[in-house]
């Protein structure tokens, strides 16, 4: 039997209610923080929708069949009626321009190739979303990181989101629902996901198969902040050791002793992480991997900010400066999406970090 979905009871209840009533809406937005189960839930829903052998009890408990033809095809990634649309598909596109892209968004031509049809990729064939289900039970399209859909893609999807073919379901998984245009959001049922509680994270740890010593586990729990996905990456990438290597320089900066090498060291972590991703996945792009590395660095720095906010909660000016630091971390993400040099962005972040903490030392 499939493991339970931890920490998202409201989302699961909403889907179970729709499944048991036989009234599953044709378009959903699964939104919430990274690593909290959105894609896992979307895949589990797809299995239940596409498998005619799913029993009423399996729909009620949200545990799809793990044996049979449908389960085997989905496990192998070859089910003809399950379409997962993600930025990495550009690497194997029929369109040369897509293959050469940096995979930092999901452009219209990619959506046409794998869902809507038309354009260079699918002008002479029936659009995937309108094809008859090959196994005859329905079609599911999951768009992962849907916030990366560019404006053209989102506008092109509007008609399909409003009036999809019969027994066709579209699931948009996103960390940043606000980056979806209002007309997309209005055509979908919204399904919020939140960070897991301490109890839910404990249950997840017990069946995750991951191991870490007590100090590392305590740090990972603070770092992950209720995200099993982040906790898994932290163990795999040994992020606790990375943090131990940079924490002294940050603490020194907070006390007014600026480390001129810190910005470069932070950028080096992102670069080395991105190189490993590209080495392990021939379809990955360095630019997308850089952004993923910066996400991890931002989460580590954000964990420090949360700790310091808790410690300075009774000192308004100090707490406000830590809030400014949190915004500065967010600004690095915005700057990276605007293609500003990451070393410059991180050097500026360290300079701000140091200036703010130096000012705080006088309190």
Image (spheres, grey):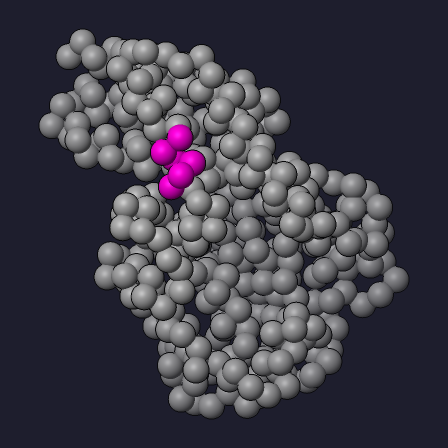
Rendered location of residue 169, percent (x, y): 58, 70
Give the left or right position of residue 237, taking residue 128 as reference.
Answer: left
Give the left or right position of residue 44, taking residue 140 as reference.
Answer: left
Task: Look at the image and tell me whether residue 221 can be seen.
Answer: no
State how many labels appear: 0
| Residue at x-position 36% and y-position 68% | 207
Per the image, is 272 magenta?
Answer: no
Residue at the left extreme, as displayed: 314
Give the left or right position of residue 141, taking residue 202 as reference.
Answer: right
Rendered location of residue 319, percent (x, y): 21, 25
| Residue at x-position 49% and y-position 24% | 265
Magenta range is: 240-245
Rendered location of residue 306, percent (x, y): 27, 35
Above-or-below relation of 175 to 246 = below
> Magenta-highlighted stretch: main secondary structure?
helix
Above-or-below relation of 86 to 141 = above
Classify residue 325 by image quadrant: top left
Q: State which quarter of the image contains the C terminus.
A: top left
Task: Look at the image and tell me whether residue 333 can be seen.
Answer: yes
| Residue at x-position 25% and y-position 11% | 359
Give the left or right position of residue 11, taking residue 112 as reference.
Answer: left
| Residue at x-position 54% and y-position 33% | 270
Classify residue 104 by image quadrant: top right
Above-or-below relation of 144 to 270 = below
Residue at the front extreme, as displayed: 213
Rendered location of residue 204, percent (x, y): 34, 64
Q: State which quarter of the image contains the N terminus.
A: bottom left
């Amino acid at each position: 039997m499939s493991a339970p979905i931890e920490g998202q009871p409201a989302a699961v209840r909403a889907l179970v209610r729709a499944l048991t009533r036989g009234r599953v809406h044709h378009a959903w937005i699964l939104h919430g923080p990274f690593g909290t189960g959105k894609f896992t839930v979307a895949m589990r829903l797809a299995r239940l929708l596409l498998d005619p052998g799913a029993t009423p009890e399996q729909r009620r408990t949200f545990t799809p069949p793990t044996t049979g033809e449908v389960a085997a095809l989905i496990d192998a990634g070859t089910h003809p009626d399950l379409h997962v649309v993600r930025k990495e598909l550009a690497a194997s596109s029929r369109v040369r321009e897509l293959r050469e892209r940096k995979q930092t968004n999901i452009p219209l031509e990619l959506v046409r190739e794998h869902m809507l049809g038309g354009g260079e990729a699918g002008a002479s064939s029936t659009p995937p979303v309108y094809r008859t289900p090959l196994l005859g039970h329905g079609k599911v399209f999951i768009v992962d990181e849907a916030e990366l859909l560019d404006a053209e893609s989102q506008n092109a999807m509007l008609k399909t989101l409003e009036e999809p073919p019969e027994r066709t379901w579209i699931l948009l998984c996103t960390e940043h629902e606000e980056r979806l245009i209002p007309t997309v959001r209005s055509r979908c049922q919204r399904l919020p996901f939140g960070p897991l509680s301490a109890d839910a994270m404990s249950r997840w740890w017990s069946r995750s198969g991951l191991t870490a010593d007590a100090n590392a586990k305590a740090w990972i729990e603070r770092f992950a902040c209720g995200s099993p996905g982040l906790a898994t990456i932290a163990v795999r990438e040994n992020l606790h050791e990375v943090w131990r290597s940079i924490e002294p320089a940050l603490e020194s900066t907070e006390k007014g002793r600026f480390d001129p090498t810190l910005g470069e060291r932070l950028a080096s972590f992102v670069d080395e992480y991105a190189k490993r991703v590209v080495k392990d996945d021939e379809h990955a792009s360095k630019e997308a991997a850089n952004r993923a590395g910066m996400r991890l660095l931002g989460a580590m720095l954000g964990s420090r900010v949360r700790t310091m906010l808790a410690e300075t909660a009774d000192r308004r000016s100090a707490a406000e400066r830590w809030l400014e630091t949190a915004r500065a971390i967010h600004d690095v993400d915005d700057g990276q999406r605007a293609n500003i040099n990451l070393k410059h962005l991180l050097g500026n972040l360290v300079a701000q970090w140091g200036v703010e903490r130096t000012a705080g030392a006088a309190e």
